[in-house]
Amino acid sequence: MEQTIAAIATAPGMGAVGLIRISGPETFIKVSKCLSTSKPPAEFPERKAILTKLTDANGDVIDEILITCFHGPKSYTGEDTAELACHGGVLVMRRVLQRLFEVGIAPAEAGEFSKRAFLNGKMDLTQAEAVMDLISAQTDLAMRAAHEQLQGRLGDNAELIRQEILGIAAHVEAYIDFPEEDIDTDTGAALSKRIATVSEDITKLLQTAEQGRILREGVRTVIFGSPNAGKSSLLNRLLGYDRAIVSDVEGTTRDTVEEVLNLQGIPVRLIDTAGMRETEDAIEQQGVSRTREQVENADLILEVVDGSCARINHLTDEEIGGRHHILVVNKSDLNIHSDWKEASGVMVSCTSGEGLDSLVSKIAEELSMGSAEWGGHAVAINARHQACLNRAKSALDAAKETLAVGAGAEFISVDLRDAMAAIGEIAGRIDTEELLGEIFSSFCIGK
């Protein structure tokens, strides 16, 4: 029998109200041992908050609470569940949780409530992952994509693909059952076309992988340049508040400073870096080394230069390496040096704010944020989904190639079964304990 588990479901810290969630087969029996009411929770009106007192082993009141009961399977986890709304003090919440543990309720592991919801058929694996995406969403667009996945959009798409492969596999296995029949040319061509159509559907889903990564993690935007070019000032201007220290002293920024900016619904992770220069200072050398590492991992590089000075060496095409790149010519309020007057960058003044709107528009243009594909799609796959889809596509390509060379139906069937297995992993229809452990370990306690 599954253990009955409990955890604090609200964020750490002090608040007016804190919520503790309990789930499992003995939820109502165990909780009844902690309440002052004579009526057992199993008889409480379902989904209605009841005011009562939670007491310790001696009958002394720990807190006055509201308890809401959900009878399985009509609950989040599919099990009997109770939610205790307590006063949100740190000590109060700790004492309530401790009392629940005293009566035999076990501490919940990270993501255990959502894991039980998946195992009890309340949601598929993509929906369970969307729960954490929704909690972690930093922009409206990321939240909308998580909502779509939570509604089962990705799982439904994956199941449609799996069913189509299943249909093809059933057709092929009919030839295995009747070995005297060979797959003729016309039938082979029709099967090949069906496989190609499914492969195209998988390709469309794979194309959302980069969008999914950006919606979840943000665009890694590195602010790069020489000392005193205005990198930290640009960071502060874009954020709208003073996040980084600004000084005329070269080498003030010695470590990376990172903040997230919501730009047209896309989270942009702005990373201010140490100025690039030769230095004997050991600490500053570490900062310069980290700057190089950040540039190598960047999605977008904002290269800031001092427009009032002569042009100096800046990033080469080889160093940019195909990454998105925008040249930002700062200090446009001063006399712009002739070296920069014909530059293809954006002229800004971090002192006056002039040109910042143009820079924001340029960033949006560089990242194609204005195109219909951002926000128009309802599915944004993550790295796990991408790996499953790539395996499925490879298996389908192998099946198509095997079909083309006229190999036996048995070989084609193996490839199609591999493709179905890979697609099935997306929604968790084929799973292992290791896979589930990896996914739910990233959840917060109480979810």
Image (cartoon, helix red, strand yellow):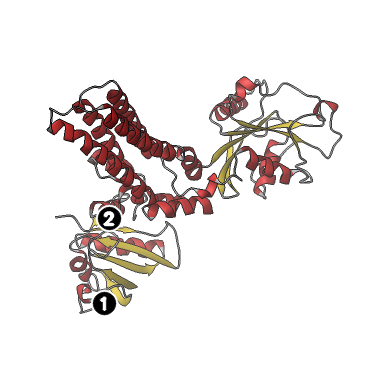
Q: In this view, does 108 lie above or below 382?
A: below
- Whether 342 is drawn above or below 269: the answer is above
Q: Indicate left or right for 242 with 410 as reference.
A: right
Estimate how packed mark 1 is, as few (under 14), some (14 to 19) or many (20 or more) residues with alpha carbons within 10 Å. Answer: few
Q: Is residue 303 above or below residue 58?
A: above
Q: What residue type is labelled 2?
A: Ala
Residue 356: quadrant of the picture: top right
User: Count the marks: how many?
Assistant: 2
Frontmost residue, 265 versus 17: 265
- Give the numbered dot on residue 378: none
Could you tell me residue 208's position as x and y percent? 46, 40
Q: Earlier in the sequence, mark 1 or mark 2?
A: 1
Residue drawn 24% across the image and 78% down it: 37
Amino acid type, residue under disc 1 in the picture:
Pro
The residue wearing badge 1 is 45
Residue 440 in view here? no
Q: Residues within 10 Å of mark 2 (few under 14, many from 20)?
A: many
Q: Does residue 38 show up?
A: yes
Residue positioned most to the right:
335
Where is residue 409? Give x, y as percent: 20, 28
Instruction: Single out the residue that lies furthest toward the bottom.
Output: 38
Question: Label 2, on which residue?
Answer: 117
